[in-house]
Image (cartoon, rainbow, N blue to C red):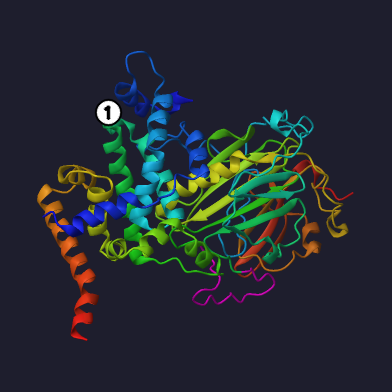
Amino acid sequence: MSDDLEARLRDRLRGAPLPAAPETLRDYLDHLPLDVQPSGPPRRQLRPRVLLGVAAIVVLGLGVGTVLVGAPPDVSPTAPPTAPVSVQPTAPRSPSTGVRRFEAPGISFDYPVDWIDQTSTVEFPRIPGVRFVVLLGRGMPVCPPRFGSTSKPTPEPGSCQEQALAPGSMVVSVLELTNPMPGTTGRGPKRKVAGYPAWEEQVSAEPANPTQLQWTIQAPDGSLYLVTAGFPRADLAARRTDIEKVLRSLRLSAWQAPPRHRQWACAPGFSRGFLIRLSGRVDGVLPARRIDDGPRRGDSGVTAGDTSVPNRFVSAIYDPTRRSCN
Amino acid sequence: MLAMAGRTVLSLEGALTNGGGTDTADAFLRLAGGELDRAYRLAGLILGDQHEAEDATQDALLRAWRAGSTLREPNGFRAWFDQILVNVCRDRLRRRGTVRLVAVDGALATRAAGDPFRTILDRDEVIRAMATLDDDLRIVIVLHYWADLTLEGVAERIGWPIGTVKSRLHRALSSMRSRLEAPMVAEVRR
């Protein structure tokens, strides 16, 4: 079978100046998560839940889901966990090649340069105790959310997309619960992320596509950062490693949130912390007056301030011992 | 940390320790590190995209660690890892067939233009002809002529019978010949 074509093929292919593996790949190997479970039996059972509050936040039509559970109070807002060494004041490091630094009050991390920062398109509802930190798209621009309107964007070929369905695409969002109720933890196995206490969960069950992973990370000042990544289910392993790489660069620090909006000042429990539940598509800024309506809904805790409209509602779940507005 | 990986660690220890108590993870990282450039280039030639090549290599590394129990001989690490990598690449190629990534803001187009693999695949008529082959035919060519594997070695990597590899190689070369000769025929007819 050997002929001139075969010789030329050998010659051209072997003589081609192929690039060496990029540094990011070497870095990946250096930090390969060798503590991952092998595939096989389910890795855990959900522990019994004392549902003080559930934050199922669905924003932007992206299915950014959050689930928090009350847990044995291993967290105290008055005695925040010891800050990891890495968050002691140090000169900021320059981001490595191929990554861009994201910085916002209290948080910074490095992410690949080919991810698109879409935070500016987001008009997140003003919700006490919740800060929308960042929205990133990998291989796709995310359609701007239309809060205050029930109309959906109409993606055209080549335009924005609402879900990460294409291979290689991903949507990453970061929210911060600035004042969580004492004892609130994330759901899923506890672990460390960049030295901070964290919980990791695969939010969406089989066979949902796109699927979601969520990390709940506790900052030194007691706030909780919710990092949610949505991507095609088939890309689970690759996208998990992408996010893990980003999370390793995470640096959190205490920061002073601006004063709360006056309309929310009387809302019960806010001084002690609360959880927020959003469900369905969130449209518009929450009408603050409803928050003062008093307890109307209960899980294990007490919920106040439901704002129910067709297909969407918002509620705050607060500490029942502090429900007075006095 | 390694204890969490359970069975995989135990099995890897069987294959990767050299009797001197070499740490399993270190052994894996050392072997994988030695294959990194080659693996990335192989993935790049198969996929024709540097970012996909990086993703595929990452995916293969993770799968390899998790599948350590299937590695029987440390000397067979390259063949074993090649198998995993080729499978990952073929998975990605299959998905390409059903869902296409839509270039959305020009960033992807810019990225493709500067892609070293795409540049190489575009610049030479022989390699260009190879790049137009069906995915499985192209993989056979890359493994046989670039990775310098015997046909048995190619069969092992892809998991096909040797007869299938031979027939696909034959088909690939015939197709390339036709493509390379076509312009000359047109020239003569003129």
Position of residue A63 relative to residue A105, above or below, is below
Location of the N terminus of chain A by quadrant is bottom left
Q: Confirm whether the magenta stretch covers residue B61.
A: no
Q: Residue at x 53, y 65 (%)?
A: B110
Residue A107 spot, x, y in % from top left: 72, 45
In this view, the residue in front, A302 or A32, is A32
Residue B187 spot, x, y in % from top left: 23, 81
Dot 1 falls on a residue whose secondary structure is: helix
Q: Residue at x 19, y 66 (%)?
A: B177
In this view, the residue in front, A187 or A107, is A107
| Quadrant in the picture for residue A69 | top right
Q: State whether residue A53 appears in this view.
A: no
| Quadrant in the picture for residue A256 | top right
- Is the residue marked by circle 1 packed among few (<14), some (14-19), or many (20+) residues within 10 Å? few
Give the prevailing secondary structure in the magenta stretch: loop
Amino acid type at image mark 1: Asn
The residue at which mark 1 appears reads as B75
In the displayed orientation, state which residue is furthest to the right.
A326
Residue A160 spot, x, y in % from top left: 56, 70
**Image-based side of B102 in relation to B187, left or right:** right
Residue A21 spot, x, y in % from top left: 45, 44
The magenta-colored residue range is A144-163
